[in-house]
Image (cartoon, rainbow, N blue to C red):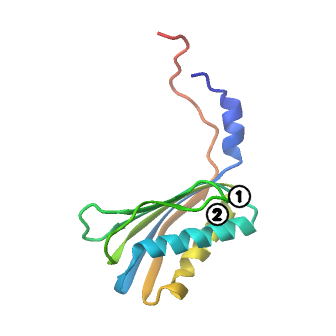
Amino acid sequence: MAVDYELYAQGEALLGWLNSTVRLEGRKAFDANAVLERLVDAIQERLRSADAEVAHLKMTFSPDGGLGDIAVINLVRNDYVPEVSQALEHPVESGQLIINLRAEAAPEILRDAVESAVAGLAEHFRGLKAKLEHLEHFRPGKPQPTHRISASM
């Protein structure tokens, strides 16, 4: 497939990227599905108010001591409803949440939206601690393809 890397680079330059890890711990077991739904709604609302268009927001929660079960929620546009693609069957006591966000906005806007949404979780879930362990936000560089196939085989 022919790819116009200049056009691709222009599109990528519009996006802010954010990757984050959040530690969630409750004094008692909590519904991780409800936490993810609340968090995605809060991030979506903050991005809407900043006129930032979501390209992709994905959150994956992995409970501690689980048997490989995870909770996953996705959002692919501001005007869409977040979609739960995997849910946990039982409440959990703790785990790790990974947030990947791509949106048409400055990376700092993404950072502010995620940080404030994570900080606001305690208001809605009594006894839940949400600690940002890692957060990086940036704009991607221009793609530099290393391999190109110039003729069909």
Image location (x, y in percent) of residue 153:
46, 9
The secondary element bearing badge 2 is classed as helix
| Residue at x 60%, y 35% (from the top left corner) | 143
Marks 2 and 1 close (CB-CB < 8 Å):
yes
Secondary element at tag 1 = loop
Question: Which residue is at 52% across, 64% downward?
Answer: 135
* Quarter of the image where one finds residue 87: bottom left
Label 2 environment density (alpha carbons within 10 Å; few <14, some 14–19, many ≥20): many
Q: Is residue 113 above or below residue 137?
A: below
The one of 148 and 126 positioned closer to us in this rendering: 126
Q: Where residue 72 sits in the image (x, y, percent)?
A: 43, 61
Whether residue 132 appears in this view of the structure is: no
Is residue 122 visible from the viewing direction of this image?
A: yes
- To which quarter of the image does residue 17 belong? bottom right
Task: Note whether 6 is above or below 130 in the view shown.
Answer: above
Q: Which residue is mark 1?
A: 106
Circle 2 is placed at which residue position?
A: 110
- Pick whichever, 128 or 85, lies toward us: 85
Compared with residue 68, is residue 152 higher up or lower down, i.e. above or below?
above
- Distance (Cα) linking label 2 and label 1: 7 Å
Give the residue drawn at x 59%, y 75%: 117
- Amino acid type assigned to the residue bearing label 2 in the image: Leu
- Mark 1 Cα shell of 10 Å, populated few (<14), some (14-19), many (≥20): some
Report the residue at 30% width, 62% height from top.
69
Query: Disc 1 marks which amino acid?
Result: Ala
